[in-house]
Amino acid sequence: MRRFLLVTFLFSAAALAEPAIRLSLPEAEALWHEHNHEVRLARSAVDGARADLVAAGQRPNPQASMNVLSISPWSGYGAGGWKDKKMDTQLRIDQVLERGGKRELRQKGAEARLAAARRDLDDTGRQQLMALQLAYYDLLLAQDRRTVAVEAAELYGRSLEAGKLRHRAGDASLVEMSRLQIEKSRADNEARQSQADLEGAQAALAYLVGRETEAERLVAADPWPPVEDRDLAARPPEERADVEAARQRVVAAEAARDLAKAQKRRDVTVGLQVEHNLQNNPTNSYGFGVSVPLFIWHEYEGEIGRAEADLDAARGLYARTLAQAVGDVSQAKSALQAARERRRRLETGLLADAEKVARAAEFAYAKGAMGLMDLLDARRTLRQVQVEAATARADHAKALATWRLQAEFGKTK
């Protein structure tokens, strides 16, 4: 008992030295928006896709070249400055003219990939917000379980002290004292384990809200969400961010397939040339040229086949993502209904009955009308039901948060 009181005192002293950071769920979400690492990475992907869109809309740059011809070391280069040397100088500019709507197809694909990246950002935010809310309720559950464990340890400590007095007076046997000591040790172990669980839940929430160095001071301050009887209506799964992102990738893959086929439309390269000739009589001449590729060895069959395969994969991914979204909604609905019923049964019946039985057992034992084993059994039952009730509240809260973010795509209020 003394050791447990010392540990409790040390935790209390630390709490006084470092005041607790009490967070409501909206406050935790505000910190999450500011510090979440995964959302930052998803924003970077959007920036990259936006840059790709700019690049996709750019026409090929012209190519400038200068050639010096008719250099003969045997006849000399001639006297005078550079412009008087006996050689030909050519300045040429070539410009590729794309055909087959290649630029428009690149833009279409880049726009679809940008839209997909934005929806990926939305989906990352949805998933990370879900992780935040589940971590918040895990901390709230750890706090409740620690409270139950500490209260049980204190109760067994008082019972053990009272039992020692009764043993000295001859009212309690040595066997009863041993049983009390065993139960007291179990309760102390559970209290220590509950403290470790609490610290783990604090660390998990601290990572999500960017308060890693202050994890041991975090306290979930909100009450459990109430049980509501309302119809569960889900939005169409096609509107969910990950499903929409997969659909946009199908659009991008179709554009990539069309772009691969457009390679069979020959691009034309047009060139303009100016030649300065100093071999005989200095003259300037002008010319132009046109070049096109010759499809002798291939006609981009490999590129087209790859694009077709990528399109099939994108369509399959969309179908799988849509099916997963439908399954997520169904599972979330079932989990919420089950959690709601379990919590209601525990709070409206079992918990009250267990508390009533425990109070009656304490009174009867104090009056000598009940044995120690029956008292201990009533206490264990109460503690078990209290833990089950706290777990049921957490399960309901997490199921509700999951439903709202899986089916309604909304924010838990």
Image (cartoon, helix red, strand yellow):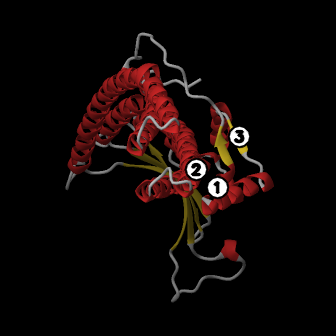
Residue 49: horizontal and vertical position, in percent? 51, 43
| 293 or 59, nearer to the observer | 59
From the image, state whether disc 3 or disc 1 is nearer to you.
Answer: 3
The residue that appears at 80% across and 56% down in the rendered structure is: 17
Q: Is residue 233 above or below residue 111?
A: above
Residue type, numbered disc 1: Glu
Give the vertical position of 269 relative to 379 (above or below).
Answer: below
Residue 152 in sight here: yes
* For discs 3 and 2, the disc positioned in front in the rendered view: 2
Q: Earlier in the sequence, mark 3 or mark 2?
A: 3
What is the secondary structure assignment of the residue under circle 1?
A: helix
Q: Looking at the rendering, which quadrant does residue 315 occupy?
A: top left
SS state under label 2: helix
Q: In the displayed structure, does residue 117 sit left or right of residue 19?
A: left
Label of residue 212 in the image: 1
Label 2 with label 1: CB-CB less than 8 Å: no
Which is more toward the observer, 371 or 96?
371
Q: Which residue is mark 2?
A: 162
Q: Amino acid at mark 2?
A: Ala
The residue sitting at the front extreme is 170
The kind of secondary structure element at disc 3 is: strand
Residue visible at 39% across and 40% down in the picture: 374
